[in-house]
Amino acid sequence: MARIAVLDDYQNLAKTLADWSAIEKAHDVTVFNQQLVGEDAVTAALSQFDVICVMRERTPFPANQIAKLANLKLIVTAGMRNAAIDIAAAEARGVTVCGTPSPRNSQPTAELALGSMIALARHVPAEAANMTSGGWQSTVGTELAGKTLGIIGLGKLGTAMAGFGGALGMNVIAWSQNLEDAAASAAGAQRVTKNDLFRQADVVTIHTRLSDRTRGLVGASELGLMKPTATLINTSRGPIIDTDALLTALRAKQIAGCALDVFDEEPLPTEHPLRSEPRALLTPHLGYWTHETLTSWYGGMVDAIAAWQDGNPIRMLTT
């Protein structure tokens, strides 16, 4: 019998969105609803487990952590990549790492960015709160048609966002380090320089991966180029934006507001200053958090465990 841990299932969804019955007949499955914070907590909680199922980058598994889990034989991650797992260290320890498929529709995060853009333009959070408290109109919204949408990163999600912007009648511009004119044009956007994107855009939305070259990509210099009426949306990864610089810009009214779905630390600490910033629309990392995606991921975890038990691991992630 293998001991299997399913981590970071905050809402108890794992066993309702996938059929674990065959796995549970032969193995012990434990679901963790609270985040394990720090290597000591992870080690204490998981030292006896053979298999660990992880949700995208919520609990990190660097080399030091993997080394402390003597019984660990298999890690299954939601999705087909997870920057929080040291795959080379897992390979060196003989730990198999497998991924899970995503549904065909790969744009739920772009859909959330679209909703956030509209919510900021029409002051939906403030007006909804005003209605709940018994009030009526208190703000004046802004139309998106004719405005400029600046997209950082023009991969699948950025391209989906370009389509949304075009459908709204927005002028779409884009930048990433290796973006070429032809690729931008094919996505319905115009390639511009990074500085020009921040100068021209009425809405800047981030759809690039976190890496050494994108960490801190949006800092005081970039925020200083933005129009005071412009907004910033991040549904990618928190550290792409310098949070301190963003707070300074919001407090100084350098920009009109921001919508953030991702943060440097998640869950976002209760007393974090972003939580009390009136110009910030915050959501708790909902980008990929849809019924369709989670059903695919949890079902994929079950399939991966079964295949590994049969000696034929599937969707292996390697260096």
Image (cartoon, rainbow, N blue to C red):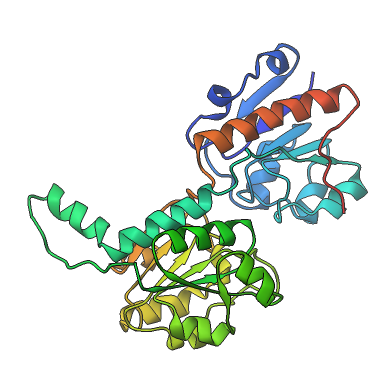
Image position of 237 (left or right of 40): left
Residue 162 locus on image (x, y percent): 52, 63
The residue depicted at 66 percent of the width and 28 percent of the height is 299
Image position of 59 (left or right of 108): right
Evaluate whether residue 223 shows in this view: no
The residue depicted at 61 percent of the width and 70 percent of the height is 185
**Quadrant including the C terminus:** bottom right
Residue 1, placed above or below residue 255 = above
Residue 255 locus on image (x, y percent): 35, 79
The residue depicted at 57 percent of the width and 40 percent of the height is 8
Quadrant location of residue 189?
A: bottom right
Quadrant location of residue 309?
A: top right
Front residue of 214/167: it is 167
Evaluate whether residue 158 shows in this view: yes
Residue 121, placed above or below residue 48 = below
Front residue of 161/285: it is 161
Q: Residue at the top extreme?
A: 25
The residue depicted at 56 percent of the width and 76 percent of the height is 190
Residue 228 locus on image (x, y percent): 33, 83
Residue 101 locus on image (x, y percent): 70, 38
